[in-house]
Structures are given as C-alpha cells and as structure tokens.
C-alpha cells in the first residue's frame, strides 16, 4: 500500500507515485477507471466528453470560458458536457473527492498499458 506525506498529496504527485509503483498498480487503477468512467466511455459522444473532462481536470482555473477557448467551442457546450459527465458517472465535479476520483480515473486510463 502506498502512503503519502501531507506535503505530497497533490493529485499529480499521487499519480506519478502510482505510475512508479509498477504495471500491476496501473492495471488495477485502469480497471477502477473503466468501472468509474464506463458510462462515459459507452456514450456515443465519448470523445467529446472525455476531451472536455480532461481539459477541465487539467485546468488551473476550472473556467469554462478558458476551456472553451482551448477546445474551440462555446462555454455552454463545456458546461453541458461536464454536466453530462456528472450525470453519467454519478459524481459531482463540485465535490473534491469526486473530482479527485475522476482525475485518478482519467490519468489511469492514460497510463494503462495498451
């Protein structure tokens, strides 16, 4: 089991340590990620939803206007996609624990062996 000191609990640090723990850990995280994100991955517009979710999670501000500029769409489109992700996963992006779970799931999918 991994332990994290209080100073290193940022999501990016945790993800880096998880990936350094070896492929077994990544596989387990990828399975968790697929379970959490399965409704999103099964949606017909999954690419748009995942792209928007990833952009929001990686954003420094969480501003839908800034994310819309990056994705070349309207900010209401960003809001609608994020709302849809929340409905599909049952996770609120406004709750830190839910946002952290979604962040870990997105990162685990990106790190999984192909």
Image (cartoon, rainbow, N blue to C red):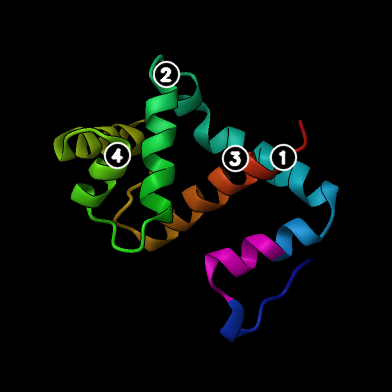
Image spot of residue 33 (x, y percent): 60, 40
Image spot of residue 60 (x, y percent): 35, 63
Q: CA distance from mark 1 to mark 4?
A: 24 Å
- Residue under the image location 60 percent in, 79 percent down: 8
Q: Residues within 10 Å of mark 2 (few under 14, many from 20)?
A: few
In the picture of the structure, the residue carrying the numbered disc 1 is 112
Any mark on residue 82, and which? Answer: 4
Q: Secondary structure at mark 4?
A: helix
Q: CA distance from mark 2 to mark 1?
A: 21 Å
Q: Secondary structure at mark 1?
A: loop
The prevailing secondary structure element of the residues shown in magenta is helix
Q: Earlier in the sequence, mark 2 or mark 1?
A: 2
- Residue under the image location 24 percent in, 38 percent down: 78
Q: Is residue 8 visible?
A: yes
Q: Are marks 1 and 3 in contact (CB under 8 Å)?
A: yes
Range covered by the magenta-colored residues: 9-16
Q: Earlier in the sequence, mark 1 or mark 4?
A: 4
Query: In the image, is residue 50 part of the stretch drawn in magenta?
Result: no
Any mark on residue 43, and which? Answer: 2
Between label 3 and label 4, give the one nearer the viewer.
Answer: 4
In the picture of the structure, the residue carrying the numbered disc 3 is 33
Where, quadrant-wise, is the N terminus in this rendering? bottom right
> Which quarter of the figure has residue 108?
top right
Between label 2 and label 1, give the one nearer the viewer.
Answer: 1
Q: CA distance from mark 1 to mark 3?
A: 10 Å
Q: Relative to 95, say whether 107 is above or below.
A: above
């Amino acid at each position: 089991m991994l332990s994290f000191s209080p100073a290193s609990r940022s999501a990016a640090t945790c993800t880096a340590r998880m990936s350094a723990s070896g492929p077994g850990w990544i596989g387990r995280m990828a399975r968790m990620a697929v379970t959490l994100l399965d409704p999103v991955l099964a949606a017909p517009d999954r690419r748009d939803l995942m792209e928007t979710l990833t952009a929001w999670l990686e954003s420094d501000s969480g501003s839908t206007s800034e994310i819309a500029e990056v994705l070349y769409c309207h900010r209401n489109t960003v809001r609608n996609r994020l709302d849809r992700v929340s409905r599909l996963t049952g996770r609120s992006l406004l709750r830190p624990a839910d946002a952290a779970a979604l962040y870990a799931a997105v990162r685990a999918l990106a790190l999984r062996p192909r």
